[in-house]
Amino acid sequence: MAGFEDFCASLGLSVGIGKFLVCYLISIPCCFLQRLLPAGAVRHVWATLSGLVLTYIAFGYESLGHCVVACVVAYGSMLVYRRQCGVITFFTTFAYLIGCHVFYMSGDSWRQGNIDFTGAMMILVLKVTSVAYDYQDGGKPQKADDAKAAAAAAASDAPKPIKALPSLLQFLGYTFCCGLHFAGPFYDFSAYNDWIDRKGIWAPGTRTPPALVPFLRAFIQGIFAAVIQLKLASILDIDILKTPKVYFDMPYWRRFLFIYHACEVTRWKYYFIWSISESAMIAAGGVQRMGAQDGQGGRRKGGRGEGERGG
């Protein structure tokens, strides 16, 4: 452990962030192994176990307990009261998430260079809420107009109603899938099941775009973003913001450059995370741009250019 602490210190990282980054990088081979497993229950089991183990390593036992609370609320409401399970899950899990942010003072922790489970918890809450709402919608009587809308949704990338209660294994596999709940991207339950069971665009014999070049592009882009972020962070003394007298004594142009520099340090961190997340999804069997222009279903994290343009 001392060696790992020294390694993190050499990069200017806290041990907590170091563990998070290692687990996030490990999610790539976990996702790649997932695509080699046979369709069905084996893939659900691997998705669940790999996600739980990575969560424990990155954030500890306590994080698993909080994740279980959100899962129990969502799946329990789906079992007990289908008509309003989405509403129940939404208000309960988001209230719990906000409580965790306040109790653990996660904002202060992030400003001090640490990290906690609340970031991953945000993606997990989105996932369980989405499943609950899709299951709630799937139980509503369907009218003629609704049938047309459902047919249009089935042919598009829109979320699809869930008719039958997912098994607990399906639910947990989707929620914790290979650690992809650490930072997203969010994807629909029906897309996850199609991928697990090798249906739809993942059906045997279906032609999908090549994955190697897009994977390498996303991964190298992520490493480049990490190098830039570390370099920028090493030449910026962010503690100046904690001493207002020093900061406000600077000329205006210097304050402007300082704030711009501080924003760049933060942004490159997220570009790294998004790129590694995209490369993990591609390794799992996704494609580079899963959207209308390619005729594929799924999600993609935005890159630096899209982030700067706000799109």
Image (spheres, grey):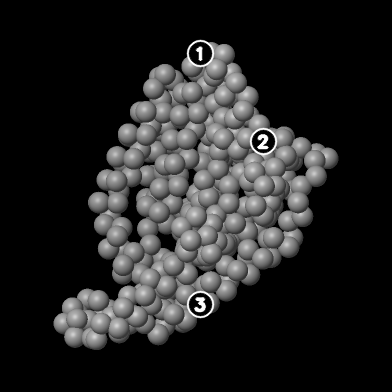
Q: Nearer the viewer, mark 3 or mark 2?
A: 3
Classify mark 1: helix, strand or loop.
Answer: loop
Question: Disc 3 and disc 2: Cα gap in Å?
Answer: 37 Å
Question: Disc 2 and disc 1: Cα gap in Å?
Answer: 24 Å
Location of residue 71 in the rendering, given as x and y in whole percent from the top left corner:
43, 36
From the image, tell me which residue sits under label 2.
Answer: 194
Question: Disc 1 and disc 3: Cα gap in Å?
Answer: 53 Å
From the image, tell me which residue sits under label 3.
Answer: 228
Q: Quadrant of residue 32?
A: bottom right
Q: Residue at x 64, y 44 (%)?
A: 292
Mark 2 residue crowding within 10 angstroms, few (<14) / some (14–19) / many (20+): some
Classify mark 2: helix, strand or loop.
Answer: helix
**Residue type at the position of mark 1:** Pro
- Residue 131 visible to the viewer: yes
Location of residue 47 in the rendering, given as x and y in whole percent from the top left corner:
60, 45
From the image, tell me which residue sits under label 1.
Answer: 141
**Residue type at the position of mark 3:** Ile
Q: Residue at x 58, y 71 (%)?
A: 223
- Residue 61 visible to the viewer: no
- Residue placed most toward the observer, 26 or 282: 282
Location of residue 138 in the rendering, given as x and y in whole percent from the top left corner:
52, 21
| First in residue order: circle 3 vs circle 2 | 2
Q: Residue at x 51, y 77 (%)?
A: 228
136 up-or-down from 14: above or below:
above
**Residue type at the position of mark 2:** Asp
